Amino acid sequence: MRSQQQTAFSVESFEDFPRVLIQARIAAGMSQRELAERLGLKEQQIQRYEATEYTSASWSRVSEVIRALGLTVREEMVVSAPQQGVEGQSGS
């Protein structure tokens, strides 16, 4: 990414998203310290986010990380047929 190359990361579910954020940071040649500086945070906070796969990060913070990494997110959401036997879903 540093030499103006673009790298695409594929995400099949929201569960994959934290892994992609970490991969994107590494692909950009950015250290945890550099990302922390861009966000005005301590390096330890980025270490915690990555160690816990961003579970403690708010959506606002994740958006800031996306911008700091220079990522462009293209969205596609697919609605699957409801699974039978899932609690809380009506049969209509």
Image: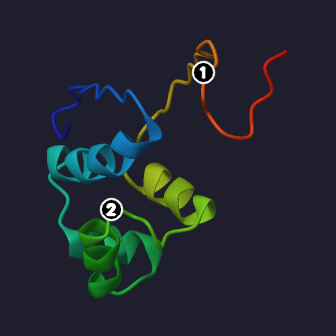
Number of residues whose C-alpha sits closer than 10 Å to that of mark 1, classed few (under 14), some (14–19) or many (20 or more)? few
Query: Disc 2 or 1, which lies upstream in sequence?
Result: 2
| In the depicted structure, whether residue 1 falls above or below residue 50 | above
Three-letter amino acid code at disc 2? Glu
Residue shown at 62%/62% (left/top)?
Answer: 60
Which residue of the protein is positioned furthest toward the right in this rendering?
Answer: 92
Residue 70 shows in the view: no
Q: Which of these two is toward me, 53 or 61? A: 53
Residue 76 shows in the view: yes
Mark-to-mark CA distance, 2 and 1: 30 Å
In this rendering, would 79 be left or right of 71? right
Q: Give the mark toward the camera: 2 or 1.
A: 1
Res 68 quadrant in image: bottom left
Number of residues whose C-alpha sits closer than 10 Å to that of mark 2, classed few (under 14), some (14–19) or many (20 or more)? some
Whether label 2 touches label 1, CB < 8 Å: no
What colouring does the structure picture have? Answer: rainbow
Residue identified by numbered label 2: 53
Res 55 quadrant in image: bottom left
Residue shown at 60%/28% (left/top)?
Answer: 85
Residue identified by numbered label 1: 84
| In the depicted structure, whether residue 22 falls above or below residue 8 | below
Determine the secondary structure under disc 1. loop
Q: Position of residue 78 (x, y in %)?
A: 58, 16
What label does residue 24 carry, if any?
Answer: none
Three-letter amino acid code at disc 1? Gln
Marks counted in the figure total 2
| In the depicted structure, whether residue 43 falls above or below residue 78 | below
Q: Position of residue 63 (x, y in %)?
A: 55, 54
Q: Which of these two is toward me, 42 or 13? A: 13
Q: Position of residue 3 (x, y in %)?
A: 15, 34
